[in-house]
Amino acid sequence: MKLYTFVTEFLQLIILIGIAPAFTGWVRMLKCWSQGRTSAGLFQPYRDLDKLFSKDVLLADNATWIFRFTPYLVFGTAVLAGGIIPMLTVDLPIAYAADVIVLVALFAIARFFTALAGMDMGTAFGGMGSSREMTIASLAEPAMLMAIFTVSLASKSTSLSQMVHVIYSGQYVFRPSIAFALIAFILIALAETGRIPVDNPATHLELTMIHEAMILEYSGRHLALIEWAGMMKLFLFVMLGIAVFAPWGIASSGDFIPILSAFFFMLLKLGIIGIGLVLIETGLAKMRIFRMTEFLGSAFLLATLGMLSFFILE
Amino acid sequence: MDINIASQITSFLAALVLLTAFAMLAQRRMYGLVNLFAWQGLFLSINTAIVGFVAGKHHLYISSVLTLSLKVILLPYILHVLIRRLKVHKEVEMVVNIPMTMLIGIALVIFSYHLTAPVMELSTLVTRSTLAVALATVMIGLLMMITRRHAVTQIIGFLAMENGLFFAATSATYGMPLVVELGVALDILIAAFIFGIFFFHINTTFDSLDVDQMARLKEED
């Protein structure tokens, strides 16, 4: 293990923390344009975060340590997850220690604590949000694991770096199993990151909130950390999708030039995926919450079909 | 075309046929159902043409064109007209709920894979791996006929089953003889017309196309 791999790892984390708000800003900007509104610009999320950091934290009297601890934990797990997913290069020191199952577990920890923090204050909306979030999570997580396992069947490994290596080395062909897994992954990513058919990230109506309802009581730097982690989660899911389904451009060594080109490839892919996300979001209406079982059930079904078609057709 | 690439493309199309079969199980709207049926026919038609090209069986081109004109254009058109005339384009009612139906569908896929595994080992055709998918499509069509209450959806299930049979014939033996295929195509067409006439009669007699109504034998009770 060489020293520069740690440097690239560090660089990747900086990019994750730094670019995630810009990606959210890009999506919001496209959304404004597609709806004929004037957008606040690419850098509005940074300004929002800055504003929140400079504000005071208001804590309820009955807030426990869970409530104060959760923002840091959510932010920390998001950063840690960024160390596992190959964004610029596959040569990551942490990636050898943790595979995709750890990644799902990291997201699960963050969600568990957010749900606890939602209930911590004893407000009605927090509890409602927590209950909804856990309902969705219990359906989304198995489907997500199934979709990733389908891909790892083809690469015979659950390590993300290894998956990218296999896709690079073998000739990439029409793989029905991977196509199924990709559709399932898109459905799950929409649910996990709280985008439109499942949850509306811009809603101000408490009754329809899911993720927002849990963090309704947060303020100041706590809210800033949670919002930032939310942006990073969206970014991470996009990166995970790229690494698993379209890794072309990610550097397979740790040299400077491939990493630089990988960075530009990443920006290009982010731009394209942002457009796709906005097309999905403007084309669909938010779903009734009781339809969610069907939505995530079909994601699970698609992932299972992908796994079956790996055995049947390949 | 390389045999390897051709077999990959047929596998991919088989996966798409299976996907449309499942989408039909999940679809609630009548028009959506008909459109999905048309898509399934389209994938089937492309698949048949590719198999015909790879295997050098030129009569498969004719069945491909026949599939395209009948199952992608004519039958969906007839069904659209039927749905509009009968005013039945509302949501479809089901006996079993959708997630349950889908789980049964997955079980059927596994079952048909298990069933066709010995056949696949003996066969040497390019298309041998798609046989399991074809059988699964037949079974899912049957499942749709069982789980849907509405007469029109049951017919779509029947037609999807026929799609599966056609697919099975293509993947198991490079298609049936042309005479048989022409006969089947004509049968399907006539069946569609007869179904149409029947629907009108059922609709005027029972004021509904829900087949549960037909369980009653007496006129009043």
Image (cartoon, coloured by chain):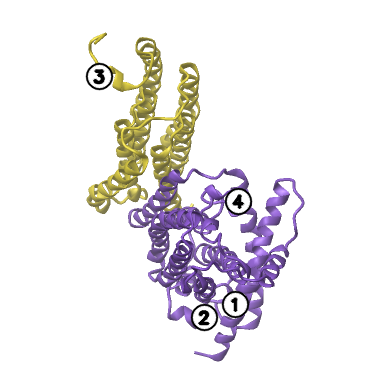
Chain colours: A purple, B yellow
Which SS class for mark 3? helix
Q: Which residue is tagged 4?
A: A203
Spatial CA distance of label 3 from label 4 is 49 Å
Q: Which residue is tagged 1?
A: A12
**Residue A238 vertical position relative to residue A303 in the rendered view, above or below:** below
Which SS class for mark 4? loop
Few, some or many residues within 10 Å of mark 3 (<14, 14–19, 20+):
few
Mark with earlier residue (2, 4): 2
Spatial CA distance of label 1 from label 3 is 67 Å
- Mark linked to residue B215: 3
Name which residue type carries label 4.
Answer: Thr
Q: Quadrant of the C terminus of chain A?
A: bottom left
- Identify which residue, B132 or A121, lies in the foreground: A121
Mark with earlier residue (4, 1): 1
Instruction: Report whether A158 appears left or right of A220.
Output: left
- Mark linked to residue A92: 2
